[in-house]
Amino acid sequence: MLKILKPLADIAFFSRGPDILPSSNAFIGLVIVLFSVATAVAFYVAKLSMMYLLPTLLLSIAAYAVLTLVPLRIAQKQERVAQTFAAFLGTDAVITLLTVPALFLLVNFPSDSLSYQLGQASYLLTLIWSIAVIAVILNAAMEWEKIFGFMLAPVYFFSLVLIGQMLFGADGG
């Protein structure tokens, strides 16, 4: 599992690009398992209803597939689909696992406590980090000017949040 996490962490921490990932269905399968486990851990720690886990996973994977396929098709870079898709899911898994302590603070401490406020600040920083990682992956995959990835990433991110809220309610369960 560490052989999978290391390159994904390198991408999430902006030290390498998605081109370091294998372009294979087997690797994508392993990344989907990692993504599913990370999401399940976050659901458990955040005390979210597990009945929403599978729909959340399917929605997220589908959204990442669209985010990968559409821009790469427009940019005529279809050969990068597997690596880009794996980078999106894998870095999301890494960031999700690093968000678990913030979720723990948000769920287990009163809203007026310093611990809760630390959890809020940490969670906000990871959301901003997620958007930046999406933008960097898009820029690397499409070889666009930097501004386009940074414009598209927040649109994608908040669209996913809004779709999730419409499907599962404002509190996610």
Image: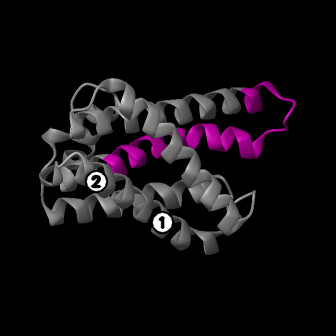
Q: Is residue 114 rendered magenta in the image?
A: yes
Left or right, 24 with respect to 149, comes to: left
In the depicted structure, whether residue 122 falls above or below residue 58: above
Residue behind mark 1: 57
The kind of residue on which mark 1 rests is Leu
What's drawn in magenta, residue-wise? 88-117
Q: Total number of numbered labels?
A: 2
User: Can I make out residue 153 in this image?
Assistant: yes
Residue behind mark 2: 85
Q: Nearer the viewer, residue 144 or 42?
A: 144
The location of residue 75, given as percent across then percent down, is 22, 45
The chief SS type of the magenta part is: helix
Left or right, 158 with respect to 36, comes to: right
In the depicted structure, whether residue 16 falls above or below residue 97: above
The image quarter in which residue 132 lies: top left
The location of residue 64, given as percent across then percent down, is 39, 56
Disc 1, SS: helix
Q: Nearer the viewer, residue 138 or 89?
A: 138
Name the residue rendered at 74%, 29% in the picture. Answer: 115
Name the residue rendered at 19%, 46% in the picture. Answer: 3
Disc 2, SS: helix
The location of residue 80, given as percent across then percent down, is 16, 49
Name the residue rendered at 55%, 36% in the picture. Answer: 127
Residue at the farthest right position:
112
Quadrant occupied by the C terminus: bottom right
Name the residue rendered at 37%, 34% in the picture. Answer: 149
